Amino acid sequence: MLIPSSGNLRDLLPGEKCGLSAVINVDEAGRLALVKSALIVHRGEVAFGAVSVHQGKFHPFKKRGSVHKRLDEVDAQRDLPGRVAIAHNRYATAGDPDARKNIQPLVWSESRFGTPIAIAHNGTLVNHLLTRKELLDHGAL
């Protein structure tokens, strides 16, 4: 493994903001994804969200504030059932920090695949309108 010249292994981490976590094929994936998010809470304390999948249905969950401070408010068995989940900590660099629509993961109820789709990304999508148009033009949304 390469050691950065600073000697600090944190310098190997990406410099973007926000924090992403995922858990796949594990019981209580939603709870574990949020616990992982709490471990990287320094990557965003404005809001947090998660989406789990159970029996083919998506279960989105979003809250304002720090996942570390509000984790006990989540009933993962009820709110995030299933064995697959993604989670996101929001560090607001663009968009209204209080708007629920800006809390990730983003979920679309329909896609060209006949199923919902959920994504979480790191950083600011400066070309979001063009990206959305291209996704629509290609039938991804």
Image (cartoon, rainbow, N blue to C red):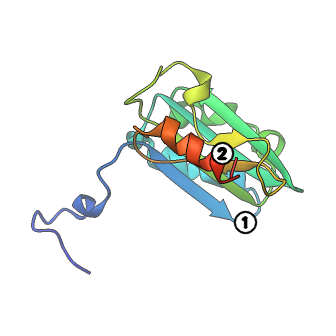
Mark 1 lies on residue: 26
Residue 2 left/right relative to 104: left
Q: Does any portion of residue 119 appear in the rendered image? A: no
Q: How many marks?
A: 2
Q: Position of residue 13 (x, y in %)?
A: 31, 59
> Is 122 in front, or is 34?
122
Does label 1 or label 2 sit earlier along the sequence?
A: 1
Up the image or down, 71 lies above or below 19; here it is: above
Q: Residue at the front extreme?
A: 137
Circle 2 crowding by C-alpha within 10 Å: few under 14, some 14–19, many from 20: few
Looking at the picture, which amino acid does disc 1 mark?
Val
Q: Quadrant of the N terminus?
A: bottom left
In the displayed structure, 51 sits above or below 99; it is below
Res 132 quadrant in image: top right
- Residue 49 drawn at (x, y percent): 61, 38
Q: Nearer the viewer, residue 70 or 15?
A: 15
Residue lying furthest bottom: 1
Query: In the image, what residue occupies the spot 84% across and 54% down?
Result: 114
* Residue lying at 70% horizontally and 52% vertically, measured from the top left: 139
Q: Nearer the viewer, mark 1 or mark 2?
A: 2
Q: Report, in whole angstroms, how far the alpha carbon at label 1 lies from the one at label 2.
A: 33 Å
- Indicate the quadrant where residue 41 lies: top left
